[in-house]
């Protein structure tokens, strides 16, 4: 029996699936972070070794057993140099002759849309929109990191929440519940201490993004400032999706647009603003939840390359994505 490995390496965890040559999943395992640009190569090597070793053990496959191929989709794997580094790392862990390294957004797109033309909008700590047309052309909007972009992301919303709290405190903006909520969340004595908290110890992006839940709660309690922040974030994400749809000339079709990430888990103000913005550019768009997770997208892409078949044929025909309420 031949084996395939699909890997989704994100900023906080790595998911590995082992499948047979027909794509039937035999085992799945989760390890530590998989973005070496954030945590370094030694940490990623440990994450991969742990998750790969565990998944092989679960399936009763020896560590040195030959693997027909592996496809790893990783956050930040955009440049040839990065892909070369990860290929070398995997070559030292797996007995295989075929190693593919892709950006994590691409395997997410393939899994979400089952390899068909469409768009994926990912909004978690960061944000990005990626699309593909029938010719296989890929277009991206956003995804430039929290310093240069990531509009509509959890980080973006969290940063704006802190700004709104300070503006409210200063009298430069509308009063908002976020003033008190930020103080309580960080266990500060007063809001002025936020400046010391942020600049003396630093706040990593995921900690800033955690304020997203505060904004949602404030909006639920009728806070107009919080509601505005969510609406703005939804529009930003919608504009990213529209940019991809327009560049791929999918406007007059019924493009599949999948949404993924923690920001989209709440079906409220942000989601409605996103849908409204998107449907101005593509009225017939089908907004879906991803049918398959990224690691399955990695397997599908790998099988397509190995078998020289269209990636759409690596999914079961009866597993079509369902439109979700918008």
Image: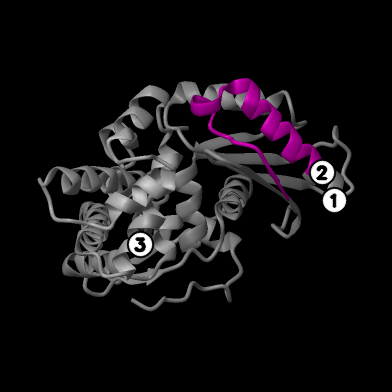
Look at the image and tell me whether residue 121 can be seen. Answer: no
Q: Which class describes the residues within 10 Å of circle 2: few (<14), some (14-19), or many (20+)?
A: many
Q: Are marks 1 and 3 in contact (CB under 8 Å)?
A: no
- Determine whether the residue tagged by mark 2 lies in a helix, strand or loop: helix
Q: Which residue is mark 1?
A: 59
- Determine whether the residue tagged by mark 1 lies in a helix, strand or loop: loop
Q: Is residue 138 above or below residue 235?
A: above
Question: Coloured how?
Answer: one colour
Magenta stretch containing residue 39, yes or no? yes
Q: Which residue is mark 2?
A: 56
Q: Which residues are magenta?
A: 29-54
> How many angstroms separate mark 2 from mark 1 (CA)?
5 Å
The residue lying at 62 percent from left, 50 percent from top is: 299
Q: Which residue is mark 3?
A: 216
In the rendered image, the quadrant that contains the C terminus is: bottom left
Upstream in sequence: badge 1 or badge 3: 1
Look at the image and tell me whether residue 222 can be seen. Answer: yes
Which residue is more in the foreground, 155 or 98?
155
Q: Are marks 2 and 1 in contact (CB under 8 Å)?
A: yes
When asked about the image quadrant of residue 187, the answer is top left
Which residue is more in the foreground, 60 or 4?
60
When asked about the image quadrant of residue 54, the answer is top right
> How many angstroms separate mark 1 from mark 3 (CA)?
42 Å
The residue lying at 11 percent from left, 47 percent from top is: 171
Magenta stretch containing residue 192, yes or no? no
């Amino acid at each position: 029996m031949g084996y395939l490995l699909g890997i989704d390496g994100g900023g906080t965890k790595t998911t590995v699936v082992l499948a047979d040559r027909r794509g039937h999943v035999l085992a799945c395992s989760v390890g530590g972070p998989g973005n070496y640009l954030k945590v370094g190569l030694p940490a990623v090597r440990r994450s991969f070794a742990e998750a790969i070793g565990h998944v092989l053990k679960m399936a009763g496959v020896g560590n040195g057993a030959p693997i027909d191929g592996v496809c790893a989709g990783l956050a930040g794997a955009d440049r040839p140099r990065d892909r070369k580094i990860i290929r070398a790392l995997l070559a030292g862990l797996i007995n295989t002759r075929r190693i593919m390294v892709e950006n994590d957004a691409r395997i997410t797109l393939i899994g979400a849309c089952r390899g068909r033309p469409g768009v994926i909008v990912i909004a978690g700590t960061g944000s990005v929109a990626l699309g593909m047309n029938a010719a296989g052309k890929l277009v991206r909007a956003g995804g430039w990191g929290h310093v240069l972009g990531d509009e509509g992301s959890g980080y973006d919303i969290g940063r704006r929440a802190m700004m709104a709290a300070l503006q409210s405190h200063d009298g430069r903006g509308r009063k908002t519940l976020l003033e008190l909520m930020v103080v309580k969340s960080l266990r500060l004595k007063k809001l002025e201490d936020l400046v010391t908290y942020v600049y003396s110890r630093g706040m990593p992006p995921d900690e800033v993004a955690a304020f997203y839940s505060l904004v949602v709660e404030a909006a639920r309690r009728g806070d107009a400032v919080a509601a505005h922040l969510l609406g703005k974030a939804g529009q930003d994400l919608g504009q990213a999706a529209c940019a991809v749809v327009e560049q791929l000339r999918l406007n007059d079709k019924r493009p599949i647009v999948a949404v993924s990430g923690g920001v989209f888990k709440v079906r409220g103000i942000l989601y409605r603003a996103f849908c409204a913005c998107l449907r101005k550019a593509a009225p017939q768009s089908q907004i879906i939840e991803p049918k398959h997770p990224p690691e399955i997208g990695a397997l599908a892409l790998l099988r397509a390359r190995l078998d020289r078949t269209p990636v759409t044929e690596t999914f079961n025909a009866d597993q079509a994505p369902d439109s979700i309420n918008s």
